[in-house]
Amino acid sequence: MPNPKYAAYAPAAPYFDLVRGALGELVDGDHFFDVLTDETVYEVLYDVPGWPRVINGRADVMAAFRGYVDNITLQSADKLVVHTTDDGSVVVIEYEVHGTILATGVKYDNRFCSIVRIENRKIAHWRDYMDSLAAWNALTARARG
């Protein structure tokens, strides 16, 4: 059964489930937020209005995702490819997400590559790359008429 303390984040569940599954037994915790610490650095190497380039700590990552789920609902996440290096201390994951921009009803499809450094069975650092043009097109498209 899903943890009720994360119920507000249900619109991003496909992403959280895919990531948690990709990290498997390398980390401890049931939910994506459970594998973060107060020292986790979540870095994105792209500019999206309202989304910081560097987020420090679990509470701030959760706050950023709260804004995400207020604007986008994901229907699925797929095409997962996992590359494990350095005896499992670094994991590179490639994946896609598919959803809807809530304000406009426009479809949102994007590709990501995330480099995850693990320390003490938790995420120490997350570096994210995405298809910025796909995000821009979805976020700036006109509402369905």
Image (spheres, grey):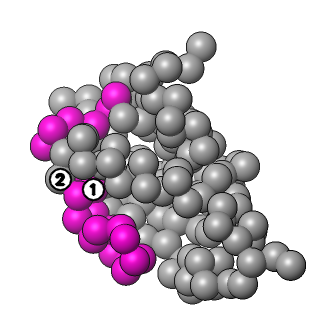
Query: For the residue labelled by badge 1, is the local secondary structure a helix, a strand or a loop?
Result: strand
Kindly tell me whether residue 97 is visible in this rendering.
no
Residue tagged 2: 56
The answer to the question of whether label 1 and label 2 lie on touching residues, with beta carbons closer than 8 A, is: yes
Q: Where is residue 59 in the image (x, y as percent from the top left)?
A: 24, 41
The residue nearer to you, when weighing 14 against 89, is: 14
Image-based side of 105 in relation to 122, left or right:
right
Question: Mark 2 packing: few (<14 Cα in 10 Å), some, or many (20+)?
Answer: some
Residue tagged 1: 42
Which of marks 2 and 1 precedes in the sequence? 1
Residue type, mark 1 in image: Tyr
In this view, which residue lies farthest toward the left?
Answer: 39
Residue type, mark 2 in image: Asn
Question: Mark 1 packing: few (<14 Cα in 10 Å), some, or many (20+)?
Answer: many
The residue nearer to you, when weighing 138 against 110, is: 138
The residue nearer to you, when weighing 74 against 71, is: 71
Q: What's drawn in magenta, residue-wise?
A: 34-55
Residue 125 circle label = none
